[in-house]
Image: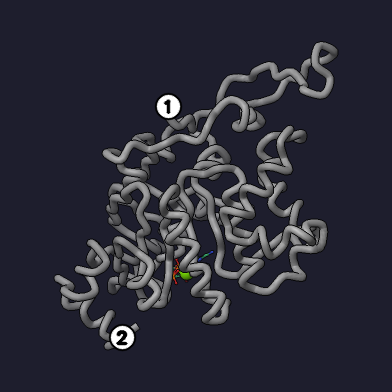
Amino acid sequence: MTIKLQAAPVRVVSSPTRAGATTEVHGAASASRADTEPRVELAASHLAMNVQDLAAGFGSFRAVDAISLEIRPRTITAIIGPSGSGKSTFLRCLNRMHEEVKGAWARGTVSLAGQDIYGPGVDPALVRRHVGMVFQKPNPFPTMSIYDNVAAGLRLNQWGRVPDMDERVERALRLAALWDEVKEKLFQSGTALSGGQQQRLCIARALAVEPEILLMDEPASALDPVATLRIEELMRELVRSYTIVIVTHNMQQAARVSDYTAFLMMGEDRAGRLIEQGPTDELFTNPKDSRTEDYITGRFG
Ligand SMILES: Nc1ncnc2c1ncn2[C@@H]1O[C@H](COP(=O)(O)OP(=O)(O)O)[C@@H](O)[C@H]1O
Ligand SMILES: [Mg+2]
């Protein structure tokens, strides 16, 4: 099974509700992944993502430069570094969210299971379905119920009817360790939940479309310590089936939760560069670069 990132040719999809009566012609973006494309299992020998010589910025400003990083499947990679060192920009290049900002650009290669997500003909919407994202501030859709928040991604991706929606919503909420807390109030507003629950709801929404990779940008920084711990426990659960890349400014969190760590720092030109990367325990106990050591011991940042 390979991940398909290219827009597929226009195809004819029969409508399950009116089988035999009408057929609907859907464009590439509508191809129903649930029916045609089961979740790809990455072989352990493959890299989940491979970033080579990535540079990205906004207009004439280079926010990150010369970053190469291998991301192994079913691991948590933490991106750490001082504020402004390009952590969020880097993360957003991994699912082509960065280019949503006007004037933003990226060069280099980012491959997902061997395919360059910046290659010709690649559909950014398909990239984002395989590489989901959770943001710093929990952002459930404010006018939607808990159920609809989780269903939203599936509906967007599949243009309408999803035959087994209830099961999929329940599965995503269970994966996000939220089901037991919300199963009696699925049709209440998502914004009535606590901050930690809202963030788990956003994780459920991201997982509903069955991505392979989950990007998390400081997912716990707006949460209290108990809710933070729950998110960290959840990440350790999820990494059994998903590959996770987390940006965190909290070094204790990086040390607790991640398998690999990458340390970014700004150069004199203000572009963020990768100073050091490696297994988390090695980077924190025996950093090779003096700048890493200065940062993790709290001398700056
Ligand atoms: N939308 C934007 N337009 C212009 N510059 C931006 C934008 N977003 C971030 N930057 C700049 O890019 C650099 C890296 O930002 P960011 O990736 O958010 O860093 P971090 O997440 O490490 O704090 C900073 O200098 C920041 O000011
Ligand atoms: Mg950031």
Q: Amino acid at mark 2?
A: Phe
Q: Residue at x 53, y 31 (%)?
A: 38
Q: Which residue is nearer to you in this view: 189 or 246? A: 189
Tell me: 47 left or right of 217.
left
Inspect the image, locate mark 1, and give the three-letter code of the amino acid beneath it.
Met
At mark 1, the secondary structure is: loop
Establish if 70 lies above or below 247: above
Dot placed on the residue nearer the N-terminal end, 1 or 2: 1
Location of the N terminus by quadrant is: top left
Res 100 label: none
Residue drawn at (33%, 36%) of the image: 43
Question: In x, y percent, where is residue 34?
Answer: 61, 32
- Residue 26: image quadrant is top right
Inspect this view and state whether residue 201 appears: yes
Q: In x, y percent, where is residue 154?
A: 67, 42
- Say which of 137 and 82 sits in front: 137
Q: For mark 1, what is the residue?
A: 1
Structural crowding at the residue carrying mark 2, measured as other residues with C-alpha within 10 Å and reported as few (<14), some (14–19) or many (≥20): few
- Name the residue tied to disc 2: 300
Q: Which image quarter: residue 261?
A: bottom left
